[in-house]
Image (cartoon, rainbow, N blue to C red):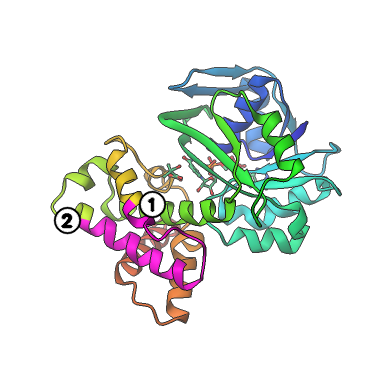
């Protein structure tokens, strides 16, 4: 199976690296700066599950000849989606499937529009990873999992084949029979998790231990869930309780990738995550006061960032 991974950042670098470590034929579609870095240093994973150094990753830049690919793993940030879609387009053939690993939901419509619903699977990942100053992928907590499947549910032959090819890696890349529900539930989790950690400017531990930390986290999750339910998305009735339990179980040092990006002064995916839900809340007249505060905090950050402060 030939896999093209767009982006070799925290997510693409990690899962693409783990696939290559198993012997899967993986090519990374990257831009100039990352190309140079990976060509010089190789792809290095520093992980609590074991380090890995891929000395000569297969690399491509947009427009170069390559393929055909069976699977394209999309691992860009949401604010690079348009360019990323354009860059993978030449490699999407009749039988190629795209698996997006981005957080959020709004990208699905754009992918369907461009490539057709039949070529796009649902996908998501649970992992805490970031790039260090040398461009190495640093992975720091127990979970390292991606999940993918047919958006309409069930298990198709192609999904089974991909799951077979991805099985046995150091980590988990598995098929789901209900990826639509899984993706919306992940969306709820990340919108709450990135929202509360960026608002409080803190890892999970101090938020949990603070006077109103758990109450506010639940309030944010309830507000987000109310919008998701109004969109008739298929989340479980008890999902907020379940996710609060998950929040309780996280290591104290656990941070969202959005908070890590903020700490590095990088762009954030506020429009794609919190903004998308707020837009729908406003259209439907739903009250989401804490979500508004969270989103506004991100907007203030963006303003200061673009003013260089
Ligand atoms: N990091 C984490 O712990 C988690 C992240 N996620 C989600 O996964 C997605 C990816 O996040 P993450 O990996 O952390 O982000 P990173 O910023 O670490 O990596 C994204 C990579 O995509 C590359 N890229 C963007 N556009 C293109 C393009 N047109 N062609 C080639 N490469 C491109 C960037 O390259 P360049 O260097 O050239 O800009 C960058 O290396 C996000 O939606 C995030 O929310 C989900 C779960 C956990
Ligand atoms: C919360 C977490 C780490 C779970 O995978 C995540 O998705 C993110 O921070 O982007």
Whether 217 is among the magenta residues is yes
Give the answer, above or below, for where 297 lies relative to 278: above
Ligand 1, seen in the image, is in the quarter at top right
Q: How many marks?
A: 2
For the residue with label 1, is its CB less than 8 Å from the closest atom of ligand 2? Answer: yes
**Residue 253, image x and y in percent?**
29, 35
State the predominant SS element of the stretch in magenta.
helix
Look at the image and give the residue range highlighted in magenta. 215-241
Residue positioned 34% across, 44% down in the render: 246
For the residue with label 2, is its CB less than 8 Å from the closest atom of ligand 2? Answer: no
Which residue is the site of mark 2? 212
Foreground mark, 1 or 2, reads 2
Quarter of the C terminus within the rendering: bottom left
Spatial CA distance of label 1 from label 2 is 17 Å
Tell me: 198 left or right of 283.
left
Can residue 75 be seen at all in this image of the molecule? no
Of labels 1 and 2, earlier in sequence is 1
Residue positioned 26% across, 52% down in the render: 200
Can residue 230 be seen at all in this image of the molecule? yes
**Residue 202, image x and y in percent?**
27, 45
**Residue 305, image x and y in percent?**
42, 55
Q: Is mark 1 on a helix, strand or loop?
A: helix
Residue positioned 40% across, 42% down in the render: 260
Residue positioned 22% across, 53% down in the render: 214
* Frontmost residue, 252 versus 166: 166
Give the answer, above or below, for where 266 lies relative to 237: above
């Amino acid at each position: 199976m030939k896999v093209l991974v767009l982006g070799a950042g925290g997510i693409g670098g990690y899962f693409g690296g783990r696939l290559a470590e198993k012997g899967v034929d993986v090519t990374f579609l990257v831009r100039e700066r990352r190309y140079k870095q990976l060509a010089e240093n190789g792809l290095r994973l520093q992980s609590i599950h074991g380090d890995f150094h891929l000395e000569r990753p297969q690399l491509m830049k947009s427009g170069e000849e390559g393929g055909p690919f069976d699977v394209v793993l999309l691992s860009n940030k949401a604010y690079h989606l348009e360019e990323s879609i354009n860059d993978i387009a030449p490699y999407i053939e009749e039988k190629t499937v795209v698996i997006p690993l981005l957080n959020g939901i709004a990208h699905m419509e754009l992918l369907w529009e461009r490539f057709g619903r039949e070529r796009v699977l649902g996908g998501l990942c649970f992992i805490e990873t970031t790039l260090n100053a040398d461009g190495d992928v640093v992975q720091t907590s127990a979970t390292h999992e991606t999940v993918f499947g047919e958006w309409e549910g069930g298990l198709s032959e192609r999904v089974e084949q991909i799951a077979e090819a991805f099985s046995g890696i150091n980590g988990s890349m598995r098929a789901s029979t209900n990826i639509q529900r899984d993706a919306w539930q992940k969306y709820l989790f990340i919108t709450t998790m990135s929202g509360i950690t960026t608002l409080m400017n803190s890892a999970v531990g101090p938020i949990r231990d603070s006077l109103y930390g758990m109450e506010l986290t639940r309030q944010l999750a309830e507000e987000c869930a109310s919008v998701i339910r109004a969109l008739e998305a298929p989340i479980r009735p008890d999902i907020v309780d379940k996710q609060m339990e998950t929040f309780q179980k996280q290591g104290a040092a656990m941070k969202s990738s959005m908070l890590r990006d903020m700490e590095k002064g990088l762009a954030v995916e506020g429009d794609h995550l919190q903004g998308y839900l707020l837009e729908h809340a406003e259209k439907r007249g739903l009250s989401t006061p804490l979500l508004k505060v969270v989103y506004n905090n991100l907007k203030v950050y963006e303003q200061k960032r673009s003013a260089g402060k």
